[in-house]
Image (spheres, rainbow, N blue to C red):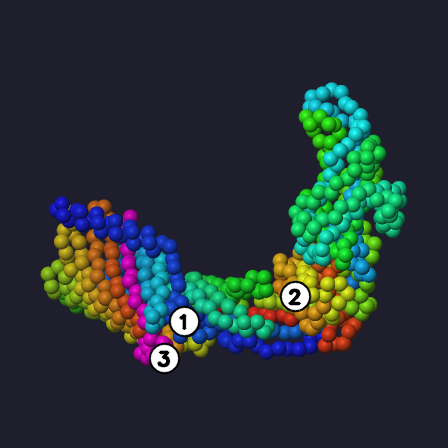
Amino acid sequence: MRLISAGARVAGVLFLVAIAGACSESLDASAGCPDLCASQNGLIQTITIDPVVLDTTVSSLTGQGTEGTILMANRGDTVDSRAVIRFDSIPDRFTPNAGDTTTQAVTTADSVMLRFNIDTAGAKLPGPVTIDAFDVNSDAPDSLISAVAALYTPANLLASKTYDVADLKDSVFFPIPGSVIVSHVGHRLRIGLRARAAGSVQFRIFAVQSGTPEQLRYRVSSDTSVKAIVLAPFSQTPTNQAQIAASLSDYTVLVKGTPPPPPDLLAVGGLPAKRVYMRFVVPPFVVDTAQIVRATLLLTQRPNRSVDPTDTIRIVTYVSLAVKTVIDVTRASQIITIGSSDTAKFTPGDSGVKEIEIPQVIALWHSQKVDVTPRAIVLASTTDGQLALEARFFSIEADPALRPRLRISYSTRKSTGLP
Amino acid sequence: MRIRLLLTVTLATASTAGAQGALSTQGFGYPQGEFSTRALGTGGALAQFDPQSAVNPASIASAGDPLLFLQYEPEFRKVTSGSLSSSSTTARFPMMVASVPIGGQYTIGFSVSTFLDRSWSTSTSKIQDVAGTPANVTENVKSLGAVDDIRFIGGWVPANWIQLGVAAHVYTGQNRLFYQQTFPDSLHFVPVEQVSNLDFTGVAASGGVIIHPSNIFALALSGRKGGNFNTRTGDTIVSQAKIPDHYGAAISYAGLIGATISAQVGRDMWSALNGLGSTDARAVDAWDYGVGIEALGPRVLSQNVLLRLGGRSRTLPFVAAGSEVHELSFQGGFGAQFARNRAAFDVTFQRATRSTDASATVGGVHERAFTLSFGLRVRP
């Protein structure tokens, strides 16, 4: 009896284990495939269409000073780009020690150092590079680049320093005479930077917008217990627009940009920055019913050998969210959202048919009402306004074989569930 | 805008959902037989006499007391093709029966049982050319759902030697088919995902008789006449066919002390389902044979235990790659009453092998399954 009782318990436990094990279904029967799965494969069909009804090159118009890096370039006949860093409030008094209730006037300054961080991606450093700093203080309108550029003169030269190529990386320290600070106390100091070298030179410095701003540091006392003064870029103009003033705390001065593209070509990148706006009319089934597997924008590239033709420019695709009432395509190219998590790489000097994958764009279009929001994409460089690289493509004005096209691969499987 | 160029179709296949993978789940699925745990333990041989099985409506007339029966039946299946194999676990609740006697001669009842279970999934990968790029495409297909048989039963015992019964059947249920194509390169490709819902509606009527010519012999006959059977997607009828007719007979001999030997034969006219699905889902008429014994076993915990053994051979309704699928199974089990005999618990173990006539044509695919069946009967 005791034995039977123990057996019953064991059986009970086994039952519970079996029941519990069967509660989680696992239905896989893949071993029978393909013999028993002859009809499971889906149909993928590919079509190529000409859906672009409007394409044009527009200015990136990202706003002066909104760039993440400032291009320092001196490319001879092609590109001349410089930097302005504003310190619009040089303190005229300082507190010697923490807790002091009295302040002292700044009468001296030494160990003045302008620090900035270098981005060497895309840099051209042919040899030792000299950086000149100029006093570019001006009451000219902030947007008047030519007026600022005119201040880069020997008369306004504050300091110069030559760096070896190996030293132009990470943080760069640029010494400035103490007299420059002393002469600007209580006023504003606007420093213009220009690079020059024996050959074509180009690099970028991280701007305030990047989160790693430039820094002006100096000592106002020989007493080392007195903390050094550290200033970040700051602009007081325009006085009534704080956000724009913040952008203008440092910005690019583009003295000479890349040559404009021929009017029948589309251009992405360059200086000033350009992007491409393309509006589409696609068959309704592509957006509304077809299950898109792959969508590829086919562009025929025309070589642009003006600046760095063998370098790589990365182009990102945005979807324009501008509604029909926004008739200015330049404005419409600013009202955008990311349309692809991938970036397409191009070599400016290359040619031929190039592909940009945009499957997510179709999904976004599916959620848009076409009678409210025109289906449009914007192609822009990931280094918009920060590098001179420019890729050019044929537009819908070109020969039919060269025009932009859209290649769509979609599943035609329409299952009712019947075996 | 101009549609200028139509490129080639990269892959040409049908769009029906015939990706079952297993021999037993071809077409609209696997018929469990609508046997109770007890009847299954005897290879189905007792099903014609068993009020907990949804085979012969006359059997309900012998229930005697109010009855509520529930069944749980997981199946552990292994499909083998050459060196490849895949194992699956399917949890099924294939049977529920409730009946109430009215007066001394009548019984009415209600049952819900699984008619065809279509639960499976497959996952396959292959290289496909998509717009000029070879892509490693993984296709995942999963089907869930079943066709259920809802019976409204009436039983009558006009005399001690005969039981009669009729039933009206409503067939209903749903198949949900999940189809997914995925690509490892998620930047360039978007996965395809589709869900198809297929609803079933059908009717049938059945009748049966159980005759006791002596105290030791019993004979049962039953038949079901199928009516219209439709599949729908939303409000649209997708296809139409008939519920298969069914004929069955069984004999039982209780001349041995404490034991009953039974045998049954059934004929299912599954071909009536042809046209409901694609031509790949071809159904064939099938025989179903079973023989088994139920005997009084040892007393455990002061309760009598019934032991059961059985064997069953049948042809499954849907062909696999054009070949008929045969199932040979052996069963064993036990049952006991408890709670002052107001409840009974039955357990059956079934080992089944499934194969085709022409295994070479389907790549040598064969299938083995181990089924556990648990039945709980309560007399409220």
Q: Both on one chain, marks 3 and 2?
A: no
* Picture quarter with the C terminus of chain A: bottom left
Residue at the disc numbered 3? B361
The amino acid at mark 2 is Ile
Q: CA distance from mark 2 to mark 1?
A: 36 Å
Q: Can residue A145 be seen at all in this image of the molecule?
A: yes
Q: CA distance from mark 1 to mark 3?
A: 13 Å
Q: Nearer the viewer, mark 3 or mark 2?
A: 2
- What chain does mark 2 sit on? A
Q: CA distance from mark 3 to mark 2?
A: 45 Å
Q: Both on one chain, marks 1 and 3?
A: no
The x, y position of residue A260, in whole percent, is 82, 63
Q: Work out which residue is located at the far top of the displayed protein and give it.
A: A101
Up the image or down, A304 lies above or below B8; here it is: above
The x, y position of residue A48, in whole percent, is 66, 74
Q: Nearer the viewer, mark 2 or mark 1?
A: 2
In the picture, residue A258 is in which quadrant? bottom right
Q: Residues within 10 Å of mark 2 (few under 14, many from 20)?
A: many
Question: Relative to B109, is A151 on the left or the right?
Answer: right
Residue B33 colored magenta?
no
The x, y position of residue A313, in whole percent, is 69, 61
| Residue segment shown in magenta | B356-380
Near-viewer residue (B95 or A81): A81
Residue occupying the point 72% across, 77% down: A401
Residue occupying the point 85% across, 50% down: A149
Residue at the disc numbered 1? A33
In the picture, residue A334 is in which quadrant? bottom right
The x, y position of residue B240, in whole percent, is 47, 73
Residue at the disc numbered 2? A356
